[in-house]
Amino acid sequence: MAVTYTNRRGKTYYLHQGVTKKGNPKYYFALRSEGDLAEVIPSGYEIYENPNAQVFLRRIRPQVITDEEVKIVEKGLQQYCRIKNCLVDVKKNVISIHTPDQNVDRLAASLSFFPGTHEEKVQLVSREALTYSPMLQFVLVDKKQRLFETQRYCFLGAIDDWIMIGTVGELPELVKTYVPHLGEESYFELY
């Protein structure tokens, strides 16, 4: 039985296997169910779905960020952020917040021909149409004391990169301070 994975958009991906020019095994996910399909996930690897619902096979990494820290960010989004449908992603020592590139309510309202409630339309749009961009991240800089620095994405043409904002601190306080700026003009004044 081939390894499959269904992403949050409901698309099923199949794990394919092949060989590199040097003769090493290679693995990748694709939507097509034909070809040389893998029947098991290789040892030391895991399936990863990024915020834009793309599916990859990646090496298992040691967990640096705790589940509790991820929950602090997710709870902070619910409490302090006016933007709904944000996603949290963790890579190595970084917790990233991704916001939708589209206005979810406007897209849902444009589906006047679609039967259902506004909330059902929001769910449909969220599942099928949204793309995401990373906007805010918390970088673990002190593993012992569990201190983080906050960074926001800078959109100045000469920079287009992460810039540090504020000072190093404890995650709950940083979330409370910076998450409310997501989707607001004040976000662009943080530096």
Image (tube, grey):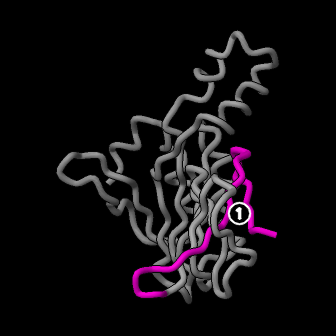
- State the image coordinates of residue 149 (x, y, percent, origin top left): 44, 69
State left or right for residue 147 relative to residue 4. Answer: left
State left or right for residue 42 relative to residue 117. Answer: left
Task: Find residue 171 and report its image quarter.
Answer: bottom right
- State the image coordinates of residue 166 (x, y, percent, origin top left): 38, 61
Eyeballing the image, is 121 above or below 162?
above
Q: Residue at x 40, y 61 (%)?
A: 151
State left or right for residue 140 relative to residue 159. Answer: right
Q: 110 or 12, which is in the foreground? A: 12
Q: Residue at x 30, y 58 (%)?
A: 161
Considering every residue shown, the one lying at the far top of the view is 113
Q: Which residue is drawn at 60% across and 46% down?
A: 86
Q: 183 or 57, which is in the foreground? A: 57
Eyeballing the image, is 35 above or below 119?
below
Label 1: state its secondary structure. Answer: helix
- State the image coordinates of residue 185 (x, y, percent, origin top left): 40, 35
Task: Find residue 120 and report its image quarter.
Answer: top right
Number of callouts: 1
Q: What stretch is highlighted in magenta?
A: 1-23
